Image (cartoon, rainbow, N blue to C red):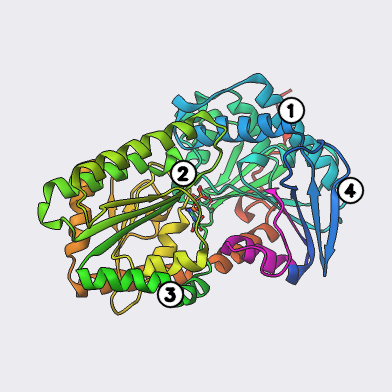
Amino acid sequence: MSRLVIVSNRVADLRAGAHSGGLAVGLADALKERGGIWFGWDGEEDGTTGAEPQVETIGKVERIAASLSAEDLANYYLGYANSVLWPMFHYRLDLVDYQTEFSESYWRVNETFARQLMRFLNPDDLIWVHDYHLIPLAGFLRQLGCRQKIGFFLHIPFPPSDLLSAAPEHTRLVDALLNYDLIGFQTQTDVNNLRHYLVESATAEQLDENTFSFGDRILRIDRFPIGIDAAGFADMAIEADDEVVMDQMRRRILGRRQIIGLDRLDYSKGLPERFKAFGRLLEQHPELSKKVSFLQVASPTREAVDAYADIRIELETLTGSINGRFADFNWTPLRYINRAIPREVLAPLYRGSQVGFVTPLRDGMNLVAKEYVAAQKPSDPGVLVLSQFAGAAEELTEALIVNPYDIDEMARQLHRALEMPLDERRERHAALRQKVFQQDARAWLNSFLNVLEGAGAAPAKDLADQVLPGERTAQSS
Ligand code: ADQ
């Protein structure tokens, strides 16, 4: 079995029990089994780009932590990755803040990372690069002579070709992507978007539905919907601490139900629209006064980017106005917590909430939707209300699917969720649960690595017809 090399913007902490997220645990386990490398930024904010990376060996795994200067963090990470690519890939061209120094830093940091990583690679390593921060990495590795198989997984959406074409540097970005052997997306929509771009722009030659040739290389594009450690999360949901148990008992005695939302505080998550939909529900259903509350947990991220500061102010204003209008001395309809909470608290909180309200305007997948399903009690489950624009909606079709821009529809579906009879709740949940447990983090990881291992070969039926670039020139001249 080949060694695995994982590259992500930020290198994970590989000490036992250090990471709480299912994804990092899954990737770290795969690394420990196969042996290999995890390479990424060390997380320090005042380093020196290009300085000798720190190497720590843990069993068969090398953790290689690279340093970045404060200037590159501002330009590569907050700038190009999070003020250009993030909004562009979430269909928000209005928020793209393109600056030449952002772009220069982005390409330069990727080139530096490639040079640093190259020294540690073995000839038969399998390299797996994660996310939009590192699109150009394979191209720079190839320039340095890297012939290993390199896969790329995009955790966020990939925009339609019309939208992408409006973005600065789209040609350069797509050309950079074509240096990978396998490009994995969360959804079929994302796969189709890149496929249409490639066909329309004639950038690469299509060999079959998912395979393209580009120069002397064969590239595969496919859908690998990411999952969670469903069994582990379901177990965690059963173990509630005293405070969570007391909160649930109190609500039960008062006959109050809870709607829950949980997100990073990001404009892509549709939080203002969600708050307004809850306000609309209370306005249209006065009988729900004191009978339902909405708990929204939103942890701050990327606060140095203006668009993130703006949304924070908007949410605080909306919370004040909804509570000012509907609250009573013994009831706060909307509780908004502006920080992260530990996963051991979060899992039982999902379980004790009758509605999971997950309404991003655009999301690669959305793991919260899957966590909510995994945490429910199968004999008396809550209802998931899910945006049609979350990648998860492609799989989780038994949720109540809503348009997150339509406030009235969201209010109606919230009401329907609160009123849903037990039989229907059970039926929908059983179908959702099966999908979440089947397509879990392990299944996602194995399917990506299996395809990457076999990548780089042309589909058999097309090999004979394939014209290599050199031959095309010879024939046409
Ligand atoms: P995110 O945009 O971060 O991820 P999401 O998939 O919802 O979105 O994952 C968030 C994770 O952080 C979940 O595990 C959640 O429990 C946790 N989390 C969020 N807010 C929290 C809080 N306040 N306190 C504690 N924990 C919190 C990106 C893409 C997604 C894609 C994932 C994985 O944007 O579309 O699903 O990567 O590929």
Q: Quadrant of the C terminus?
A: top right
Q: Residue at x 33, y 48 (%)?
A: 388
* Residue that badge 2 annotates: 265
- Foreground residue among 377 and 188: 377
Identity, as a three-letter code, of the amino acid under mark 3: Asp
State which region is magenta. Answer: 5-31
| Residue 469 x/y as whole percent | 72, 34
Q: Residue type at mark 2?
A: Leu
Q: Is residue 415 above or below residue 17?
A: above
Q: Is residue 169 visible?
A: yes
Q: Find out whether the residues at labels 1 and 4 contact each other: C-beta distance under 8 Å.
A: no
On screen, 26 above or below 411? below
Pointer 1 residue:
473
Task: Name the kind of residue labelled 1 in the image.
Answer: Thr
In the image, which is nearer the foreground, mark 3 or mark 1? 3
Please, what secondary structure does the residue beneath circle 3 have? helix
Secondary structure type for disc 2 = loop
Q: Are marks 3 and 2 in contact (CB under 8 Å)?
A: no
Work out how far the residue at label 1 is from the one at label 4, CA to CA, in angstroms. 36 Å
Disc 2 or 4, which lies upstream in sequence? 4
Quarter holding the N terminus? bottom right
Residue 378, x across and y down, in percent = 33, 77
Quick one: label 3 or label 2, which is nearer the N terminus?
3
